[in-house]
Image: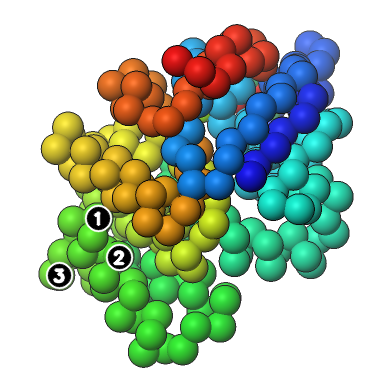
Amino acid sequence: MLQVKDLHKSFKTGDGNVNAIDGVSFSVPDGQFASIIGKSGSGKSTLLSLLGALDKPTSGSIVVGEKDIVKLHDHTLIKYRCEKIGFVFQNYNLVPNLSAIENVVLPMEFAGVSKTKRLVRAKELLNQVGLEGGKQNRKPGRLSGGEQQRVAIARALANHPSLILADEPTGNLDNQTGKLIFDLLHNLSRTEKTTIVVVTHDLDIAGKTDVTFRLSDGKLVKNGAK
Ligand SMILES: Nc1ncnc2c1ncn2[C@@H]1O[C@H](COP(=O)(O)OP(=O)(O)OP(=O)(O)O)[C@@H](O)[C@H]1O
Ligand SMILES: [Mg+2]
């Protein structure tokens, strides 16, 4: 269970404080597929980075399983992120001088998976997201935006995370490939009980998830039930 309580995040800027997340509470049970929608600037990416412990909230709590991740210390956090969370960034954040397959291998290297095992899994994941053959050996700069996006998704799945957080994971994909990725995530939520939170602008996708949250100016205006 992911439980968010009265979460606030403000940024100091030249012209005062921006309340990017302004008192958000919700929960997502294990194995549920949730979507977050909202206009540009409404706080979606900020919320996702708080959930992924990539940034600290100004106040509030985020309980994953039993742990309040806001209270974890740096070294525990790094381990937690590596083992439990798969994060797909809005701008992919692939390592530019590593090939597609090396990018997918990297988190498994951090987690101590053996060399042969991690290569086999990386290939399998890239095949699953539809990036096959020679493209697996190309560096991100020689792949299209949608292909890079799929490498980022494969990388997020590498360590069998119990929580996948994905910022617009189908934003750069054609309908058919977008559906492939959606089905892949949907399957994970059903077969592995992976909890999935995706940010999306695609209302078709949002409509197919178990639950949809809408953000507006950092506040939750639609909570849960459709
Ligand atoms: N580091 C920062 N410093 C100052 N303001 C920030 C920072 N990060 C985000 N913001 C502000 O917080 C608000 C929410 O930003 P966020 O990136 O979460 O929006 P978003 O919903 O993901 O938008 P988009 O759909 O365009 O990706 C915006 O007003 C943004 O300008
Ligand atoms: Mg964003």
Bin the neighbour count of mark 1 within 10 Å (Cα to Cα): few under 14, some 14-19, many 20 and up. many
Give the distance between the C-alpha atoms of the residues marked 2 and 1, in whole angstroms.
6 Å
Front position among marks 3 and 1? 1
What amino acid does circle 1 point to? Val
Q: Amino acid at mark 3?
A: Gly
Q: Is residue 224 left or right of residue 143?
A: right
Q: Which residue is mark 3?
A: 134
Q: Quadrant of residue 131?
A: bottom left
Q: Is residue 161 above or below residue 50?
A: below
Question: What's the residue at 34%, 81% (across, down)?
Answer: 119
Q: Position of residue 12 (x, y in %)?
A: 81, 23
143 shown above or below 49: below
**Residue on which the image places disc 2:** 125
Secondary structure category for the residue under label 2 = helix
Residue 167 percent across, percent down from the top left: 46, 37
- Ranked by sequence position, the earlier of labels 2 and 3 is 2
Residue that mark 1 sits on: 129
As rendered, which of 13 and 123 lies closer to the eye?
123
Tell me what residue is drawn at x 61 percent, y 22 percent: 43
In terms of image quadrants, where is residue 20?
A: top right
**Is ligand 2 closer than 8 angstroms to the Cβ of mark 2?**
no
